[in-house]
Structure formats: structure tokens, C-alpha cells
Image: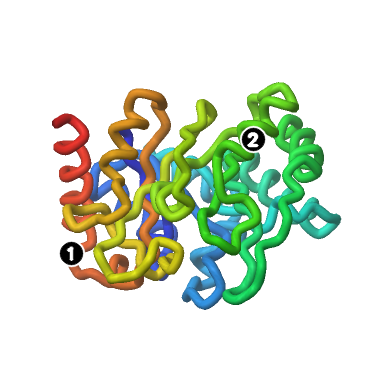
Amino acid sequence: MRFSLNHSIAPLMPIPDFFALAKEVGVNAIELRDGLPPGWAFPESSNVLNHDPQSIARLANDSAIEILTIIALQRFDQWNGERAEQARTLIGFAAAAGIRAIVLCPSVTPVGSRALATGLPAALDGLQPLLEDAGVRGLIEPLGFPRSSLRTQGVVDAELARRGNSDCFGIVHDGFHHAIARDRHYSPHIALVHLSGVPDLGLALEDLGDEHRVLVGPDDILDNMGQIRRLLGETSAPWSFEPFAREVGASPTLAADLGSSMNYIRELAQA
């Protein structure tokens, strides 16, 4: 298994220090971000777009660490002129920094409101020429929240099949979102897996949020290990840790915590 670290783990950590964390835990891939969900602390210095792309490329080269993605083009499936400009910025930065993909996240409406209808076909129409021209992939990440406009992988697969399964698109399988959407479909287009666990908090799956996402361990209720065993036979995609809970990044033993989670996953995956 090839593990990766997502900057959501420790968003207050400067980007060079995050590269150093990856080296410390023996990981040769990371994901960088241009923001976090509303309400989360994310310093301007952690936003990859506030850095020179050539400097980011040199940092990756000097560290021998691959940057898998920039996360993310938010509300990508509500396509308009503003979204197109955001896409050009992200794609252009990724291309200049040698980053092979950007993540595409659907719309999630505020608590208490109805989900928006997805505009997936129009969004992919707009994105495909931009991605192909830059040589960058767009990885679509269904978000399982009830208020998400795009919750399951099957909807994405149907649209990709309709348009000829272009190589410039792939899917992010997020174990957290797959569980809370109760999605039984596993796409053949999975290009990246996001890993996080949730302990038993006495909450329904639909009531879980990013603040509950910790490292995968024995108290996990999301059946991460069942998902992982299934995926091991179907994809060679990297496995990227994406917890959001503040206590993860604040842990004084973060590197050891990550190592323990990786060992736990490896041991059970091979059992």
C-alpha cells in the first residue's frame, strides 16, 4: 500500500514542515490544499496557491515527495464563469508545480437546507478542455453528506461512460463519505482513496461531520477495513490520510499516531 498525507491532518503546519512530517513517517506522497471547510482554521501560509509554484516543485523534488493533488475546486458542479476562473487558477498552478491532479468537490448546502441539483454534465464539459490542455487530471470526490449535490460514485460513473470515459477524469473514494452515503458502488475509475475513521459517538451516520474524522484505528465504525479489503483487489490508487478533527494535528505524538494507524491498516489488510 502506498500511503499519502493530506494537509487536513495538520493545517496549521507550514507546508515545508508538512513535507518534513511525511519524510518522518516514511511517506513519499502528500496532498496540499487551497482551503478547508468553513469554520476551520487555515493560515494563509498553508494555502498552496499563496506560494510560488516553482518553489513548491523544488520543495517536492528536494524532498523526493510527490504532490498528488491540490484540494479542491469547491462546488465544481455548479458551473459558471466564476467557477471556470477558479478552475483555470487551480489547473494552471498544478501544471506549473508538477502536480498531477486537482480534486473536484460538489456543493454542500448549509445545515437545514436542501441539497442543490448537480450540474455534473455542464461542469465536465467546461473542465475537460482545461484539464486536457494542461495535462492535469480532475478527480471527482462524491461527498456523502445528505446536503451534498453529488453523493455516490454511480452517478459519476454514468456520466463518465456517457462521455467516453475520458482519461482526464477519475474518482476519489473517500471511506467516510462512502459510509455515510451508504454507497455500495465501487467505481472502476478510482484514482485516489481518502482515509479517516470515526469512533462510536452515538450519532447516526447522517449526523457525522468532518470534525468527527480521526485516524483509522480499532474503534472505527465506518467499516474502513471492509472497504480497504474490497479496494485492494480493484485499485492501485494511493491511500491518503484525511482526518479533520483538530485533536489529530494537535497531538504531541502525531508522527507516532500516523505510524500506528498505517501499521494497523497494513496488518488487517493482509489478514
Instruction: Give neighbour class at mark 2: few <14, some 14-19, many 20+ (Cα, 10 Å).
Output: many
Residue 29 location, x and y as percent?
39, 41
Circle 2: residue type: Val
Instruction: Give neighbour class at mark 1: few <14, some 14-19, many 20+ (Cα, 10 Å).
Output: few
| Whether residue 94 is visible | yes
Residue 268 location, x and y as percent?
17, 38
| 255, above or below 61, in the image | below
Q: Nearer the viewer, residue 42 or 109?
A: 109
Residue 68 vs residue 85: left or right? left
- Point 76% across, 45% down: residue: 123
Point out which mark residue 136 bears: 2
Q: How is the image coloured?
A: rainbow
Residue identifier under label 1: 253
Residue 5 vs residue 91: left or right? left
Circle 1: residue type: Thr
Instruction: Answer with the quarter of the image where residue 136 lies.
Output: top right
Proximity of marks 2 and 1: CB atoms separated by less than 8 Å: no
- Point 21% across, 42% down: residue: 265
Point out which mark residue 64 bears: none
Q: Secondary structure at mark 1?
A: loop
Sequence-wise first label, 2 or 1: 2
Instruction: Answer with the quarter of the image where residue 246 lies.
Output: bottom left
Q: Nearer the viewer, residue 31 or 46?
A: 31
Residue 255 vs residue 45: left or right? left
Q: Nearer the viewer, residue 220 or 79?
A: 220
